[in-house]
Image: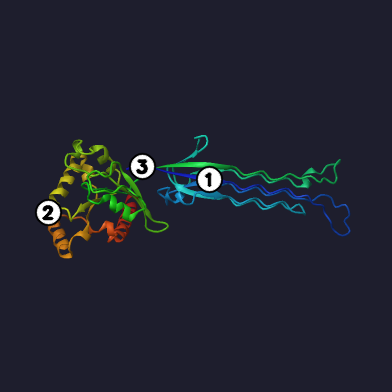
């Protein structure tokens, strides 16, 4: 499932250090001559592709980057220290554009790909550089040059790891709002979601996965009913499907089981391989029913379906059980990655 993730950042490379004007002054050595050193170069900024990231969400907050300046030259022909280069990690598949010219600067596809986006300024020359037979005591030096500054536009085609499916108003949009920073539209009428919504579920600094809220699927979707096959195809490249079931809306367990089977048939009709994809049942809106009814209803539905896969119960609007479910999803995705490798 591909979505375009975008971010804008500004980068400022370091300025080069100024050259030094200095003359050797030591005891018993008159007229020691010029000994001013050159300034150090400013730090450059490079983007590096990494598989440890899968979205550009971090750049929504941290979007300004500066490399350090070079140090000025010193006496005794000492060159100033160079500024530290700055490497910014971005997800594999990131395209880098110059905002002002729309020029493609880099296309970082594989792990370790690099793109120099802002070159550091050059250090200035010290007065030692200007010594000649005609100019024994040069007093001139040159300043360091400014580092490059750019406004960049980053674009990434994101592959969603987890897809949500279910009937309209099952609570998919509420679920994605609960577990991520995405803010899809939520309302009490069918087809609130008219296009896929993407959210990043952050487990910790190094672990996250991408989840997508797919518009509600109804019977006949594989033939174009409702919002049709336009959105069924979005599920084909996800690793895991979460089937969100509104447990509070149905009249009885048989009706709930029938609705689950209906969506299973739509997946099979659209793509038999899609129907074989790992799918978890997630019963939602548990805050609207009693504890006794919840347990008995879930057990009856599972029995009628002869369901063998994982089953979870949450209340998305109350964020009840969603955190635990997110951790289990992350664990399963990591297991799948190990198996694929």
Left/right of residue 100 with respect to residue 91 in the rendered view: right
* Distance from Cα at disc 1 to Cα at disc 3: 23 Å
Q: Nearer the viewer, residue 319 or 90?
A: 319
Sequence-wise first label, 1 or 3: 3
Q: Residues within 10 Å of mark 1 (few under 14, many from 20)?
A: some
**From the image, which quarter does the N terminus lie in?**
top left
Would you name the residue on which mark 1 appears?
A: 10
Q: Nearer the viewer, residue 75 or 261?
A: 261
Residue 251: which disc? 2
Q: Residues within 10 Å of mark 2 (few under 14, many from 20)?
A: few
Q: Nearer the viewer, residue 239 or 204?
A: 204
Q: Residue furthest bottom?
A: 292
Q: Nearer the viewer, residue 114 or 250?
A: 250
Expressed as whole percent of the image width and height from the top left, the position of residue 7 reads: 45, 44
Q: Secondary structure at mark 2?
A: loop
Q: Residue at x 20, y 52 (%)?
A: 245
Q: Are marks 2 and 3 in contact (CB under 8 Å)?
A: no
Would you name the residue on which mark 3 appears?
A: 3
| Residue 304 lies in quadrant | bottom left
């Amino acid at each position: 499932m591909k979505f375009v993730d975008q971010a804008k950042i500004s980068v400022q490379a370091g300025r080069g250090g100024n050259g030094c004007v200095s003359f050797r002054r030591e005891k018993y050595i008159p007229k020691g001559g010029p000994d001013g050193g050159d300034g150090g170069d400013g730090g450059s900024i490079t983007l590096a592709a990494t598989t440890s990231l899968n979205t550009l969400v971090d750049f929504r907050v941290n979007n300004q980057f500066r490399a350090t300046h070079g140090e000025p030259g010193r006496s005794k022909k000492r060159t100033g220290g160079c500024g530290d280069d700055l490497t910014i990690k971005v997800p594999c598949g990131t395209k880098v554009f110059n905002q002002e010219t729309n020029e493609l600067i880099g296309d970082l596809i594989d792990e370790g790909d690099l793109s120099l986006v802002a070159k550091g300024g050059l250090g200035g020359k010290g007065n030692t550089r200007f010594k000649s037979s005609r100019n024994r005591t040069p007093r001139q030096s040159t300043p360091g040059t400014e580092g490059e500054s750019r406004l960049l536009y980053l674009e990434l085609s994101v592959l969603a790891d987890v897809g949500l499916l279910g009937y309209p108003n099952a609570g998919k949009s509420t679920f994605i709002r609960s577990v991520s920073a995405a803010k899809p539209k939520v309302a009490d009428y069918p087809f609130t979601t008219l296009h896929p919504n993407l959210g990043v579920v952050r487990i910790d600094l190094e672990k996250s996965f991408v989840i997508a809220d797919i518009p509600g699927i109804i019977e006949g979707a594989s033939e174009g009913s409702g919002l049709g096959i336009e959105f069924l195809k979005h599920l084909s490249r996800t690793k895991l499907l979460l089937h969100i079931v509104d447990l509070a809306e149905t009249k009885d367990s048989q009706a709930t089981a029938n609705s689950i089977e209906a969506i299973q048939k739509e997946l099979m009709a659209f793509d038999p391989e899609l129907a074989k994809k790992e799918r978890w049942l997630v019963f939602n809106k548990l805050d609207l029913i009693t504890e006794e009814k919840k347990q008995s209803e879930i057990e009856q539905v599972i029995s009628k379906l002869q369901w063998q896969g994982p089953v979870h119960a949450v209340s998305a609007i109350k964020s009840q059980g969603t955190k635990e479910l997110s951790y289990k999803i992350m664990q399963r995705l990591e297991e799948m990655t190990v198996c694929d490798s």
